[in-house]
Each structure stands twice: as structure tokens, then as C-alpha cells.
Image (cartoon, rainbow, N blue to C red):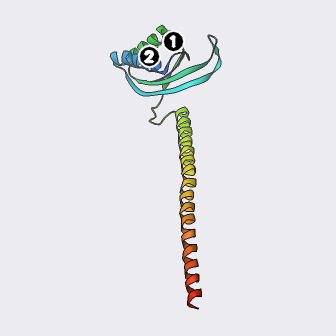
Amino acid sequence: MYYETIFIVNPDISQENIEALTDDLIAKVEKVGGRIVKRENWGSRPLAYSIANRKRGNYILLVTDGSAEALKTLEHAISLEERIIRCLTTKLTELSDTASPLMRRAQAAAKREEEVAEAAVAAAEAPAVEEVAVEAATEEAPAAAEATTEKADGAEASA
């Protein structure tokens, strides 16, 4: 059986502590024979309504594979944890290997930001390349002008 558990951690907790908390929950599930199939940290997001005077929370998704005992262990550990302000567990009819829609949107946004950053770097380098070309042309222009003048002087002298 697959179960999807989403829990919300107090937003005042550091990212390192959230990861340690999640690792501890996973260890408890694995101790009783369960297995974590998917783990996603959705980051800090606004809450639909205020919970314990908080308007934001850090969302974590765990997909568990195992017996009902593994699920009970996870839910019991979550209920004892004061840093977790809400949780919801649902039974999945089928397991998906793809990232959740929220993670796909976050990955797409990160990819767009990366492309914009690459374009900005390319745009910043382009004037530097043009400046080098302009400098080279500027250096060649006086030399060409001198050569033309010397040829003209030589032509006048021979005439």
C-alpha cells in the first residue's frame, strides 16, 4: 500500500532542522519495515488560513510504501512532534514516478531563471567582444591611413 503524507513544519525552524526532522521520521518508518518512495521539500508557502498565529509553513511530502503499522508509526511520530503544525495522509491508488505538480512548477521556474541568467551573462559578454573588435578596427584604421598616405606621397614624388 502506498500512502502520501504531507505535513507542515513551523516556519521558524531552520532548513537544516527540517531535514533532520524528516530524516528522523523516515528512520522511524524504516525501523518498522516501511519504505519511503518519494520525498519532496516544497519549501515555505503561505497557509490557506492562520494556524497558531502563523501565516506560512514549510511543506514536506513523503510517499510511504508499507504496512498499516508503518503508517501508524509515522502518524504517531508526527503527532508527538511539536514543530509540525498540521499533517494529512491519504491512500494512493497508483504510484507516480514523476515529481509532484508543485515541484514541476518550481523546477520550471528555476530553469527559466537559469536561462535568464545565461542570457544576461551572454549579453554582458557581447559588448566586451564588440569593444575588442572596435579597438582592433580603431588600431588598424590609423595604420591603414598611414599606408594610404605613404602610397599617395610615393605616387606624387614619382610624378
Alpha-carbon span between mark 2 and mark 1: 9 Å
Residue in view at x 53 percent, y 25 percent: 43
| Mark 2 closeness class: few <14, some 14–19, many ≥20 residues within 10 Å | some
Q: Along the line of sight, which residue is nearer the eye, 155 or 94?
A: 155
Residue in view at x 54 percent, y 45 percent: 115
- Extreme-bottom residue of the structure: 159
83 versus 101 height, above or below: above
Confirm or deny contact between disc 2 and disc 1 (CB under 8 A). yes
User: Dividing the picture into quarters, in which one does residue 154 lie?
Assistant: bottom right
User: Dividing the picture into quarters, in which one does residue 144 lie?
Assistant: bottom right
Q: Which residue is mark 1?
A: 83
Question: In which quadrant of the rendered image does the N terminus lie?
Answer: top left
User: Dividing the picture into quarters, in which one does residue 10 lie?
Assistant: top right
84 versus 44 height, above or below: above
Q: Along the line of sight, which residue is nearer the eye, 62 or 156?
A: 156
Which amino acid type corresponds to the residue marked 2 in the rendered image? Leu
Residue in view at x 50 percent, y 18 percent: 14
Residue in view at x 55 percent, y 40 percent: 108
Q: Which mark is residue 157?
A: none
Q: Which residue is mark 2?
A: 21
Q: Is residue 66 left or right of residue 128?
A: left
| Mark 1 closeness class: few <14, some 14–19, many ≥20 residues within 10 Å | some
Q: How many marks?
A: 2
